[in-house]
């Protein structure tokens, strides 16, 4: 089969290769999927750059955790009725070497989720890390109906879905954006208000919107950099749900202040989410897809041969939406 892989850490153009590899066979409890698309996320590029130093101990890595395709075969213990099923895939390259950037992937059947007919394979490649992270961020600590939610970086991959989940659940959503294009994306996703997170007056603007009330929850894309202003905006007993801290990679916490605010700090990564949280996200994603209640935003699509370019696009940033590799021509 045709696949992309890396056998050493480094820049995408230097270490990512595309060629022929052995086609996998489904083991007990697994399905074999003919992949159509593979989603590229920052966590995938960070792995390639060496964020998990032991990753290459057992051989080359086929990257990417997200994707979509059609089940072609099943292993023992999996109903044959699943053959021919359209599916989206999550967590493919975690705790194992072979991800979705290949013509075939063999994976635990529960990681292959039915993809409704009204959802394309390209859109299906956005549902793992972006949509599931957003779901966990919004719902990790109970219902949000009637609450004020501040979603930083609302035009980002996760923020885009977080706005939608929050609005579907009846929250009042304030998103942050850094320019007019990002603001437009936040509004299109359903944000009630959008503020400029670069503005010195952001805190006052948010409090003016809420009538002086502090927000109940913050869904945060830059935890370390945003924490000082977040602490000015969140109520006692509030929740900070964060999934990234790229600018300040090792934040220093004002522990005493946060303790006396009785805050919940929720750090989120799809791989480590409880299975119950994954299942809750999957059920809501399927229901939303079937009822056309999720918007998807695709920034770029690339051929498998151009996967290094797709990786570099993620690292360069400056765009809005998912980056997807089309595995099948």
Image (spheres, rainbow, N blue to C red):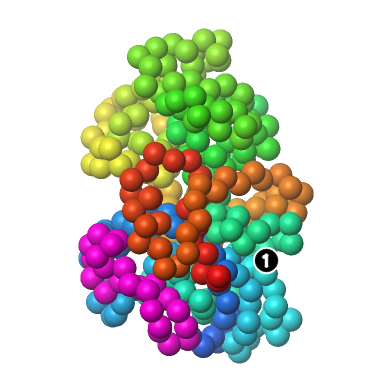
The quarter of the picture where residue 145 lies is: top right
Q: Residue furthest right?
A: 291
Q: Please count the marks in the image.
A: 1
What x and y, as percent, mark residue 305? Answer: 42, 68
299 vs 288, left or right, is left
Which corner quadrant holds the C terminus? bottom right
Q: Position of residue 30 (x, y in %)?
A: 56, 81
264 up-or-down from 150: above or below:
below
Camera-nearest residue between 168 and 212: 168
Q: Taking 189 as reference, is 103 left or right? A: left
Identify whether 183 is placed above or below 243: above
Residue 108: where, in percent of width, then height? 54, 76
Nearest the eye: 268 or 20: 20
Q: Which residue, given by chain and number where applicable, does mark 1 sit on?
A: 114
Q: Residue at x 38, y 50 (%)?
A: 314
Q: Is residue 22 magenta?
A: yes
The residue segment tinted magenta is 1-23
Report if residue 171 is visible in the image: yes
Quadrant in the picture for residue 282: bottom right
Percent of width and height locating residue 326: 52, 64
Which residue is pictured at 61% across the width and 35% down the height?
189
């Amino acid at each position: 089969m045709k696949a992309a892989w890396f056998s050493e850490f480094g820049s995408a153009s230097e270490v990512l290769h595309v060629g022929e590899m052995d086609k996998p066979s489904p083991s007990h409890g697994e399905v074999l999927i003919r992949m159509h698309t593979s989603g590229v996320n920052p966590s995938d590029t960070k792995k390639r750059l060496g964020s998990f130093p032991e990753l290459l101990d057992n051989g080359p890595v086929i990257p990417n955790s997200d994707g979509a395709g059609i089940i072609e075969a099943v292993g023992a213990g999996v109903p044959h009725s699943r053959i021919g099923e359209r599916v989206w895939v999550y967590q493919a390259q975690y705790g194992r070497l072979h991800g979705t950037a290949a013509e075939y992937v063999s994976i635990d059947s529960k990681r292959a989720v039915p993809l409704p007919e009204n959802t394309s394979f390209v859109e299906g490649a956005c549902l793992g890390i972006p949509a599931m992270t957003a779901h966990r961020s919004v719902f990790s600590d109970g219902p949000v109906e009637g609450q004020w939610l501040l979603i930083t970086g609302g035009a980002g991959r996760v923020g885009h879905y977080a706005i939608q989940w929050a609005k579907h659940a009846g929250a009042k959503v304030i998103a942050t954006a850094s320019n007019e294009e990002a603001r437009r994306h936040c509004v299109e996703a359903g944000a009630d208000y959008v503020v400029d997170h670069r503005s010195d007056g952001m805190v006052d603007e948010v409090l003016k919107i809420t009538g002086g009330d502090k927000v109940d929850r913050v869904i945060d894309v830059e935890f370390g950099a945003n924490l000082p202003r977040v602490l000015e905006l969140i109520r006692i007993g509030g929740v900070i749900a964060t999934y990234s801290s790229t600018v300040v990679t090792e934040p220093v916490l004002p522990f005493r202040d946060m303790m006396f605010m009785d805050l919940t700090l929720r750090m989120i990564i799809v791989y480590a989410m409880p299975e119950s949280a994954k299942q809750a996200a999957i059920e809501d994603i399927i229901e939303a897809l079937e009822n056309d209640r999720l918007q998807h935003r695709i920034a770029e699509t690339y051929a498998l041969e151009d996967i290094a370019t797709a990786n570099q696009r993620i690292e360069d940033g400056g765009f809005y939406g998912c980056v997807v590799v089309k595995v099948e021509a």
